[in-house]
Amino acid sequence: MKDSRPVNLKLWTIRFPVTAIASVMHRASGVLLFLFIPCLLWLLWYSLSSPQAFNHMKDFMDYFILRFVTWVFMSALIYHLIAGVRHLLMDMGVGESLEGGRLGAWIVMLFSFLLIIGMGIYLLFDFNHAIW
C-alpha cells in the first residue's frame, strides 16, 4: 500500500512555535548545566584547596577562553532559572492558556536575553585594564 502522507524531514523549513523553542532551550540548558557540574565542582575544590591555588585560579581567569566558557555556563544557568520560574508559575495556574504560554515564552526569552547580554559584557570585557 502506498502512503500518500506528506513527508518533511528538513527541519530548517519547519516553523516551530515560540513555546516549542522555549521548551527545547530549557531542556538544552539543563543538559549543559548537567555537563558543566563536574568541571565546576573540581574548579571549586581546587580554588579552595589553598591560597596559592585560589590565586592561580584568579590568574587563570585572565584568559579570554575561560571567561567565555564561564559566560556560556552562566547563560545556561540564567535561562534555565528563568524558564524554571515560568514552569513553577504555570504549575500554580498562571499562564496555562495558549496565549499565556506564548506570552510567558516571549517574556522568558526577552528577559533571559537581556541578562545574558549584561553578563557577557561584565565577563568578556576586561574593565580593570580599560583606558577611559
Image (cartoon, rainbow, N blue to C red):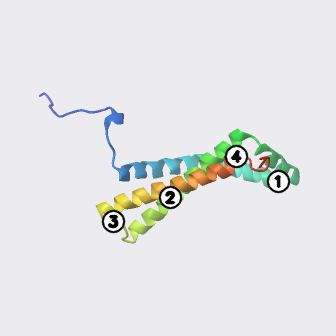
Query: Which three-letter amino acid code belongs to the residue tagged 3?
Result: Glu
Q: Nearer the viewer, residue 89 or 12?
A: 12
Q: Which mark is residue 125?
A: 4
Q: What is the spatial separation of the Cα atoms under label 1 and label 3, in whole angstroms?
A: 48 Å
Q: Residues within 10 Å of mark 2 (few under 14, many from 20)?
A: few
Can you give x and y, in whole percent of width and height, for residue 104 in the image?
A: 40, 61
Q: Is residue 86 left or right of residue 58?
A: left
- What is the C-alpha distance between the residues marked 4 and 1? 28 Å
Report the residue marked by disc 1.
49
Q: Give the Cα separation between the discs numbered 3 and 2.
A: 19 Å
Which numbered mark, 4 or 3, is in the foreground of this view?
Answer: 4
Counting residues from the start of the chain, the first of labels 4 and 1 encountered is 1
Circle 2 is placed at which residue position?
A: 111
Q: Earlier in the sequence, mark 2 or mark 4?
A: 2
Q: Secondary structure at mark 1?
A: helix
Q: Position of residue 63 (x, y in %)?
A: 75, 40
Q: Position of residue 14 (x, y in %)?
A: 31, 39
